[in-house]
Image (spheres, rainbow, N blue to C red):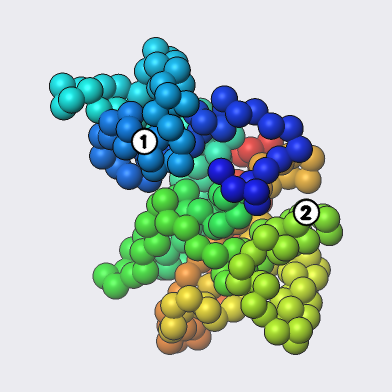
Amino acid sequence: MTDDSATKYNAPALDKGLDILEYLSQEGIPLSQAEIAQGINRTPSEIYRMLVCLEERGYLTRGSNAGKYRLSLKMYSLSHRHTPFDELKRVSHYPMQNLSEKTRQSSHLSIINNDQLLIIAQTRSPNAVSLSIEEGTHFPLTLTTSGRVFLSMFNEKEKNDFLNRDVHYKKFSYKEKEEFLSSIEKIKKDGYRSAKSKITSGITDFAVPIGLEESELKAVLAVSVFTSSLDEEIKMEQIIEALKVTQAEINKLIGG
């Protein structure tokens, strides 16, 4: 633990437990009590009772290899129980398939996870050559079209909180920050964003917000297109219109 991570309300036992779980997850191999203690800058005696508790609760297991500790599947099980995002992913499946068939382009659905963009669903283009953005991939929030759309969905305080934590935004020049904030306001007005990808050259992204005003469930639906295909195979207006139709369908399915 560092001074930077200090919180208003201290919970030393919880801190130790979380330190142990995070360290074992980071290392990915079974470790002894002494190895874990060294890794989190504590003494073996400090973490003994916590290790016993975590093992009794099923978060840690010990094998025959000298009694070393490793994470069980309990954390995985807990993290994969039903959430609003599970339902969102389920109801979005067919509308997204229809979107990809209509536009002949790949589409993907993302949420915010740890201040980053997380892809939770994708559909591939029916074309022989297509883009693929795998589920589970994270992207910087401020470097993506979808990220800007996300920020347009939050109030001023929430938006600023995200930006104050974003390492990329902190490096922007004054002019770049002005352009960024201006683009957020334009998205609020237009209801979508289209722009060339800042991460992958030759790609243009189109994105719309998903979610209801009264709900905390927020996501972004996007279509990624080879820039060279625009106007030759499909027009920007067609993609935007198809996205808006799919947006309305998904919002209806989640209670809109």
Residue 43 appears at what percent x and percent y? 43, 32
Residue 177 appears at what percent x and percent y? 74, 78
Give the numbered dot on residue 158: 2
Q: Is residue 158 left or right of residue 109?
A: right
Residue at image coords 80%, 70%: 185
Residue 80 appears at what percent x and percent y? 44, 31
User: Is residue 198 visible to the viewer in this orientation of the structure?
Assistant: yes
Residue at image coords 25%, 28%: 68
From this view, report whether residue 41 is shown above or below residue 167: above
Question: SS at mark 2?
Answer: helix
Tell me the quadrant of the picture where the N terminus can be found.
top right
Q: Looking at the image, is mark 1 or mark 2 nearer the viewer?
A: 1
Snapshot quadrant of residue 65: top left
Numbered-mark total: 2
For label 1, the residue is 36
Residue 118 appears at what percent x and percent y? 51, 53
Residue at image coords 65%, 48%: 3
Q: Earlier in the sequence, mark 1 or mark 2?
A: 1
Report the amino acid beneath label 1: Ile
Q: Is residue 240 left or right of residue 151?
A: left
Q: Is residue 1 left or right of residue 80?
A: right
Q: Nearer the viewer, residue 213 or 183?
A: 183
User: Is residue 210 visible to the viewer in this orientation of the structure?
Assistant: no
Q: Nearer the viewer, residue 77 or 75?
A: 75
What distance separates the C-alpha of mark 1 from that of mark 2? 37 Å
Question: SS at mark 1?
Answer: helix
Q: Residues within 10 Å of mark 2 (few under 14, many from 20)?
A: few
Q: Nearer the viewer, residue 102 or 7?
A: 7
From this view, report whether residue 7 is shown above or below residue 48: below
Tell me the quadrant of the picture where the C terminus can be found.
top right
Q: Residues within 10 Å of mark 1 (few under 14, many from 20)?
A: many
From this view, report whether residue 111 is shown above or below residue 216: below
